[in-house]
């Protein structure tokens, strides 16, 4: 198993009901990525998909992917936190599951990394962690 230093939270930055296939197509055809952007992708109804095994790095944060797990919710367009209650619940469940598996890992938002000029995940992760007691 690779070393996991970060559990990173993202948003797609697009409309919340975007289909996963169109997101994957964007990564493949526009970005030219061989792997997906995130390990987990959470839909507005709270359902989620695992797009990649944890063992494999994905493309969430340039320069940090080798040691990161990436979790993303659909939405967050325009820097606005559009998470539904169901998405918040699923996000909490996944983050807690990953933290239990990798206790030393730090939980961060994408924008909390150095030199990131993005609003992703469109909410303050450290504030949110306090509300879920992490
Ligand atoms: Zn991101």
Image: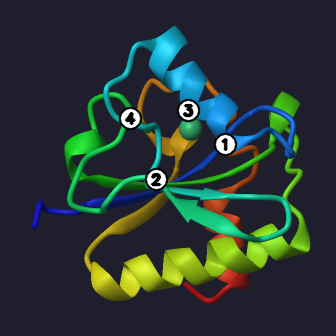
Find out whether the residues at labels 3 and 2 contact each other: C-beta distance under 8 Å: yes
Residue 32 position, x and y percent, is 40, 13
Quadrant occupied by the N terminus:
bottom left
Q: Are marks 4 and 2 in contact (CB under 8 Å)?
A: no
Q: Is residue 53 left or right of residue 97?
A: left
Q: CA distance from mark 1 to mark 2?
A: 10 Å
Q: Secondary structure at mark 3?
A: helix
Mark 4–mark 2 distance (CA, rounded to whole Å): 12 Å
Contact (Cβ within 8 Å) of mark 3 with mark 1: yes
Q: Is the distance from the Cβ of mark 4 to the nearest ligand 1 atom less than 8 Å?
A: no
Q: Which is more N-terminal, label 2 or label 1?
A: 1
Residue 132, x across and y down, in percent:
67, 85
Q: Earlier in the sequence, mark 3 or mark 2?
A: 3
Contact (CB < 8 A) between labels 1 and 2? yes
Q: Residue at x 74, y 33 (%)?
A: 13
Measuring from the top left, give residue 40's x and y in whole percent. Answer: 52, 58
Q: Which residue is mark 1?
A: 20
How far apart are the alpha carbons under marks 3 and 2?
A: 9 Å
Q: Which residue is mark 3?
A: 24
The answer as to whether callout 3 falls within 8 Å of ligand 1 is: no
Q: Which residue is mark 2?
A: 51
Q: Nearer the viewer, residue 116 or 11?
A: 11
- Tell me the CA gap for discs 3 and 4: 12 Å
């Amino acid at each position: 198993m690779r070393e996991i230093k970060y559990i990173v939270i993202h948003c797609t930055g697009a409309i919340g009901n975007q289909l996963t296939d169109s997101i994957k197509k964007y990564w493949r055809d526009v970005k030219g990525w061989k792997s997906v952007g995130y390990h987990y992708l959470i839909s507005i109804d709270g359902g989620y998909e695992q797009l990649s095994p944890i063992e494999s790095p994905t493309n969430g944060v340039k320069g940090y992917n080798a040691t990161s797990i990436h979790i993303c919710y659909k939405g967050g367009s325009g820097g606005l936190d559009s998470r539904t209650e169901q998405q918040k619940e699923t996000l909490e469940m996944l983050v807690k599951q990953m933290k239990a598996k990798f206790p030393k890992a730090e939980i961060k938002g994408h924008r909390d990394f150095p030199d990131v000029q993005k609003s992703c995940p469109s909410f303050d992760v450290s504030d949110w962690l306090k509300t879920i007691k992490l």
